[in-house]
Structure formats: structure tokens, C-alpha cells
Image: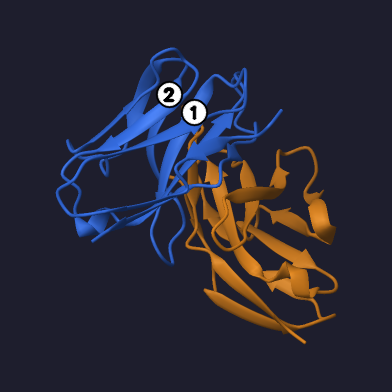
Chain colours: A blue, B orange
Amino acid sequence: DTGVSQDPRHKITKRGQNVTFRCDPISEHNRLYWYRQTLGQGPEFLTYFQNEAQLEKSRLLSDRFSAERPKGSFSTLEIQRTEQGDSAMYLCASRAGGYSSTDTQYFGPGTRLTVL
Amino acid sequence: AQSVTQLGSHVSVSEGALVLLRCNYSSSVPPYLFWYVQYPNQGLQLLLKYTSAATLVKGINGFEAEFKKSETSFHLTKPSAHMSDAAEYFCAVSSSGTYKYIFGTGTRLKVLA
């Protein structure tokens, strides 16, 4: 168990560019979550996958945001036409299957995005 | 809708003093509550979680939290602060269905020498 990994750890881009982040969950964790954390705030939910199915998206996830988990393993989060307001830490978390609210989500180190 | 409120965005304590970080929740169903810690430029690490098995929950690094339904609270405590406890602490509730977390705004703990 190597934990949740995210790549890259830091990304600096210019406004209008597209960016893609990758998350590798703990192996055999079939549930995967993306959160966004802005300065001074708690993480806010973006989207959720159960295996390869995207089951919920937050209103925060505008049409510029898209996420995939094609084989139910790693996931990618893409932001098109980035804006300065997209600057934030993007966190990925995974948890085991099952139907208990008590199951723990394990977080990756995050990708810090800076849009110039 | 479920939510959590963390009172005090910044808390300062002296090394060796009691740490008390406050969290109040709002939930129409029995809540499942979590405390996470975040060190600078890192992800979140679970400190402890309330699963309804016991109202007093012990976590890592000497932290504990008590679930009080009558006060809708889940405050985090540690008897004696250590310099290494300086970090940001988040309270979260797990929502039904997708089990996504709803986080509070966080409390930054500063430990004074």
C-alpha cells in the first residue's frame, strides 16, 4: 500500500491554457473523489467515481472541468481554458468499496495549480 | 443538508497547554464525523473518526474527540500541545449516498514555545 499519489505536485500555467492532473488511488479502492481547496478554506467536493462510473459532480465543476476514470483505476482531472480563479490545491482521495459512511477516505498530497 | 462549523480560524496555545479545537455539525441523520490534519503543502491525514461505536474517540498523536449529540458538537482535544502539532485541522461530516466529505473551513493551530 503506497498511498494515494498525484502528479504533478505543482503546475504553473498561463490563463487560457488547458491542464490535466492525474491521481493514482490506493490499489483496489474502487471509490475516488476529487476536491478543490482554495486558500484559507476547507476542501470542496468536485466529483466522485465508483469504479469507472462518475456518479456525482458538484456545481463547482463547470463545463471547463472534466474528469475521467477510464478503467476504474487512475483518474484524470482536466481544466480547459484556465482562469485565475482556478488557482487552488486539487486533492484526490480514495476509499474502499462498501456502503458505510464510516469508511475512511485517504488523501493524496495534492496538485497545486497557479494560473498566471 | 449536512454541514460543519469550525469556530476559530486561528488558535494559539503554549507548548504543553491544552488544545481545544471546536466543531459543530448539522445533520438530519446520524452523522459520521472526522478530524483531519494538514501540514503545509501536504494532503490531509486522518486523526480520528466517529462511527457511533463510542462517543469518546481516541486518535493518533494523543488527540481525542467527544461526540455530544445534545450539543451537536465534536470538539478535538489534546492534553498537552507539542510544537509538531502546529498545522491546520479540518472537521468533516460524511454525507449519505456518495459518502463525500463536507468540510469545515479549518482551524490553524499555532504552538508557542
Say which label, 1 or 2, has the lower sequence index: 1
- The chain carrying label 2 is A
Using the image as rendered, state which of residue A74 and residue B102 is in the foreground: A74
Left or right: A14 as drawn, with respect to A98: left
Q: Which mark is residue A66?
A: none
Q: Are marks 1 and 2 in contact (CB under 8 Å)?
A: yes
Secondary structure state at the residue bearing disc 1: strand
The residue located at (42%, 43%) in the rendering is A35
Q: Picture quarter containing residue B23?
A: bottom right
Left or right: A25 as drawn, with respect to A35: right
Q: Picture quarter containing residue A75?
A: top left
The residue located at (64%, 73%) in the rendering is B109
Residue at numbered disc 2: A49
Residue A95 at x, y = what percent? 59, 28
Residue A87 at x, y = what percent? 31, 57
Secondary structure state at the residue bearing disc 2: strand
Using the image as rendered, state which of residue A36 and residue A6 is in the foreground: A6
Residue at numbered disc 1: A32
Neighbours of disc 2 within 10 Å: few (<14), some (14-19), many (20+): many
